[in-house]
Image: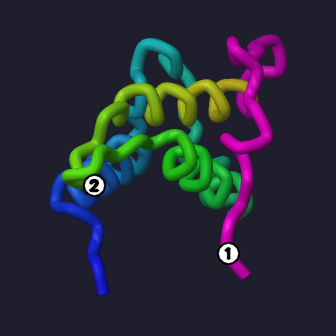
């Protein structure tokens, strides 16, 4: 059975760290403490990880290619949830927010 590369595992670990301590894209989310909302509504956290995993690109060697872009798209989604006046640009496409699994 194949495993995620160490680069992908590292990207996931740092993503979870930034998300959990409130430092995910500090410029876009400046002044927005989104952490309580994530714990209140489990589906928000589910969507955050779905967007990150759907947007993240990995090359044939298992190296991540766009970790920053994946984190930024998540930050845009969080901002949309917390700031009704904000609209992500470009708008989210269906493949970015698709939930996979049983």
Q: Residues within 10 Å of mark 1 (few under 14, many from 20)?
A: few
91 relative to 57 in the view: left or right: right
Q: How is the image coloured?
A: rainbow
Task: Look at the image and tell me in which quarter the C terminus lies.
Answer: bottom right
Q: Is residue 55 above or below residue 36?
A: above
Q: Name the residue furthest left.
A: 6
Q: Name the residue furthest right.
A: 84
Q: Quadrant of residue 2?
A: bottom left
Task: Tell me which secondary structure the magenta stretch mostly adopts.
Answer: loop
Q: Which residues are the magenta region?
A: 81-102
**101 vs 74, nearest the viewer:** 101
Secondary structure under tag 1 reads loop
Q: Position of residue 12 (x, y in %)?
A: 33, 54
Q: Residues within 10 Å of mark 2 (few under 14, many from 20)?
A: some
Which residue corresponds to mark 1? 101
**38 vs 56, nearest the viewer:** 56
Task: Look at the image and tell me in which quarter the N terminus lies.
Answer: bottom left
Q: Position of residue 44 (x, y in %)?
A: 69, 52
Taking the spot 27% from the left edge, 54% from the top edge, the residue there is 8
Q: Which mark is residue 8?
A: 2
Secondary structure under tag 2 reads helix
Taking the spot 51% from the left edge, 45% from the top edge, the residue there is 52
Residue 84 in magenta? yes
Q: Position of residue 91 (x, y in %)?
A: 76, 21
Q: Name the residue furthest front.
A: 60
58 relative to 90 in the view: left or right: left
Q: Earlier in the sequence, mark 2 or mark 1?
A: 2
Q: Is residue 41 above or below residue 75?
A: below
Q: Position of residue 53 (x, y in %)?
A: 50, 52
Taking the spot 48% from the left edge, 17% from the top edge, the residue there is 30
Taking the spot 76% from the left edge, 32% from the top edge, the residue there is 93
């Amino acid at each position: 059975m194949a495993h995620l590369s160490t680069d992908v595992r590292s990207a996931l670990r740092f993503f979870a760290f930034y998300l959990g301590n409130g430092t995910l894209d500090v410029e876009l989310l400046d002044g927005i403490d989104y952490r309580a909302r994530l714990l209140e509504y489990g589906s928000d956290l589910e969507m955050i990880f779905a967007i990150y995993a759907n947007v993240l690109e990995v090359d044939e060697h298992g190296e991540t290619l766009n970790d920053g872009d994946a984190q930024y798209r998540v930050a845009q989604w969080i901002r949309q949830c917390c700031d009704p006046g904000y609209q992500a640009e470009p708008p989210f496409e269906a493949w970015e927010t698709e939930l996979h699994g049983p």
